[in-house]
Amino acid sequence: MSTKAPSAPAQVQTSSPQWLQALLLLAPAGIWLALLLVIPTLLIFQLSLVPDIKPGDIVNPSGLDNYLRIFQPDVLKVIGRSLLFAIGTTLLCLLMGFPVAYWIALLSPKRWRNLLLLAFVLPLWTSSLLRSYAWISILRPTGVLNTLLTSLHLPTLDLLNRSPAVLIGMTYSLLPYMVLILYASLEKLDRRFLEAAADLGATPPQAFWKVTVPQTLPGIAAGSLLVFITGLGDFINPELLGGTSSMTAARLIYNQFLGATQNWGFGSALSMVLILAVSLAIALLIKYGDKNASSL
Amino acid sequence: MQAPSKNPIRISWQALFSVLMFGFMYLPILVLGFYSFNQSPNSAQWGGFTLSWYVKFFNDSRILSALSDSLKVAFCAVGISAIIGTLMAVGLARYKFPGKQLYQGVSYLPLIIPDIAIAVSTLVFLAVIAVPLSLWTIVAAHTVFCLSYVAFVVSTRLVNLNPHLEEAAQDLGATPYQSLVMVLLPELMPAIVSGCLLAFVLSMDDFLISSFTAGGGATTLPMEIFSRIRTSVKPDINALSVVLMVTSGAVALIAETIRYRSEKKRLQ
C-alpha cells in the first residue's frame, strides 16, 4: 500500500538519488498511516464479515449476518434518527449561516471583515464537549432559557433530553464551519454580476436567486457536505443533550465496543456503513461539484 | 436577500440577523462564565460572586492528572506530527510517483472519516496485535489525525510558494538537505506552527479516539469531564471550562495572528 517506496521519480536529476529523498520524506508518515489507519480499516472490514456465533445456534450465520442485522427495525430507527439529525442540522446551518456569511463577506465594513470572521469562528477553538455541556445549563428545566421565559410570563419549554436540544447543540457546533466555507465562496462573488442584474431590472430577490446562489453553489454544497458528514458521526451532542431516547449511530457503534453487551462484528459492520456513507457523499460532491468545492 | 446597498449607513436585516447569530455563538460561553462565578450552582439566579469553584478544581487531583495526561498526549502527538507531517507535505508537493493519488487520498482520510470509525478501527487493530492500551496508544492514534492536519495546512502554504527558491539555493551550491533546512523550512514555519496549534487543540479536544485507545492506563481531560457531566451540571466544571476556553481562545488568537502576518508578508 502506501508504505512502498516511490520507484520512478518523474524528474530525474543527476546530482542526488531522488528516490532516496522521496523515500525519506514520505515513508515515515506513510508507514504511520498504513499501520494505524489503512490496516485497521481493513481489519474492521474483515471483522464485520465474521458472524457472531453463539453456542446452541442451529443455523450457522452467514458472513453477511452483521450487515443483515442493520435492517432490523430498531437499528434502522437509530440510523434514520442519525440521518434526520444530520439533515436537520445541515438545513439549519445553511439557513442561519448564509445571511451571516453574506453580511460579513459583502455588507460589513471592509477592514472589519477578517476580524468579524475570526470572532465568529473563535468558539470552534474551545472544547466541543464543554460547549455542548453549556447548553445543558441553558436548556434544562430550571435553566437560563426557562428563567427568561418565566420572567416574561411565557410558558416554559421542555427541550433538554429531547430531539430539539440535540439539533440546537449540533447546529451550534457546526455553524462556524458552514459560515467559514460560505464566506470563502461569497468573498469571491463577482459583484458586477449583481450590478448588471440590477441594471437589467432584476429585483433583489431575483438577483439573489439567479446570480448569488448559482455562483456560490460550490460553497453551499461543500459546506452542507461538511456539516452533514460531521453531524452524521456526532457523538457528544446526542449523548449530552438527547437523553436516553435519542440514540444515534455513533452511540450504537460505541456500545458494541465499550458497552455492557458487546458485539465487535456488528459494530464493525456499522462502522463500515458509516465510512461508506461518508465516502459516497464525498464522491458525489467531487463528481457533481466543480473544482472549487472538491478542493476543500 | 438584497443586493449590497449603496448607502453604507442603512442597516440591513442581514446585519441584525448576524448580531443575533453572534449572540447565539457566544451565549453558551457567557452562561458558563456566569455560572462559574455564581454561588448558587443550581439556579439561573445570581447568588453572589465566588471563586470557590475555581479553587475547588485547582485542588482536584483527578482533574489535574487528567490535564497532565492530555498535555502529554497532545505534545507528543503534535511533536511527531510536526516532523513527519511536514516531510509528507514536502514530499507530496515535490515528487511524482506511482500510487501518489492513493497516498494523498489516504493522507486526507482522517480529516473526513468520523472519529467514531477511526476510534473503533484503532481499537480493533491494537487488540489484534495485542498491544496493551496506555497513554502511548493514545499518542499513536492522535498522531494519525494530527499529522493529517499539519500536512494539510503546510500543503496549502507550499502551493503558494515560489518553486524556484530551492532551485536557486541548489544552484548556489547548497545540498538538498541544506536547501530544505535553510531555505524551505523558514518559509514554511508559519504554516507548520499554525498547523501544530490546530492539531494541538484538536488533540486536547478529542474524546472518542482517546476513550477507545486509553484502556485503564490513562484518562485524558475530555474523558474525565465527560464522566462527570453526563449526570448533571457541575459548577467546578464550569470554572474549568472558563479556564480552558480562555486558554484555547488565546492559542487561537496566536495562531490566527501568525497566519495573518505570514499572509500579509506573502502579499507584499
Image (cartoon, rainbow, N blue to C red):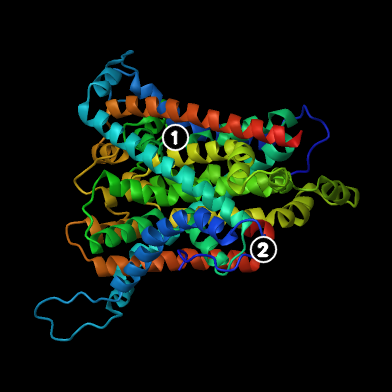
Q: Mark 2: give few (<14), some (14-19) or many (20+) Cα within 10 Å.
A: few
Q: Is residue A251 left or right of residue A112?
A: left
Q: Residue furthest bottom?
A: A59
| Between discs 1 and 2, the one toward the N terminus | 2
Labels 1 and 2 within one chain: yes
- Residue at (21, 53) in percent of width and height: B132
Q: In the rendered view of the protein, which quadrant contains the N terminus of chain B?
A: top right
Regarding mark 1 in the picture, which secondary structure is present there?
loop
Give the farthest residue toward the left: A56
| Observer able to see residue B220 | yes
Residue type at mark 2 is Val
Q: Are dots 1 and 2 in contact, CB under 8 Å?
A: no
Q: Does A117 sit above or below residue B47? A: below
The quarter of the picture where residue B11 lies is top right
Residue A284: which numbered mark, if any? none
Q: Nearer the viewer, residue B18 or B52?
A: B52
Please give the chain letter of the residue carrying mark 2. Answer: A
Q: Chain of mark 1?
A: A
Q: Amino acid at mark 1?
A: Thr
SS type, badge 2: loop
The residue lying toward the viewer, choosing from A181 and A106, is A181
| Occupied quadrant, residue A218 | bottom right
Reading the image, the residue beneath label 2 is: A12
Relative horizontal placement of residue A263, taking residue A293 as reference (left or right): left
Judged left or right of residue A83, residue A77 is left
Q: Callout 1: 10 Å neighbours few (<14), some, many (20+)? A: many
State the quadrant of the C terminus of chain B.
Answer: top right
Q: Is residue B1 visible?
A: no
Residue hosting label 1: A126
Residue B137, percent from left and from top:
29, 49
Vertical comparison of A115 with B159: above or below: above
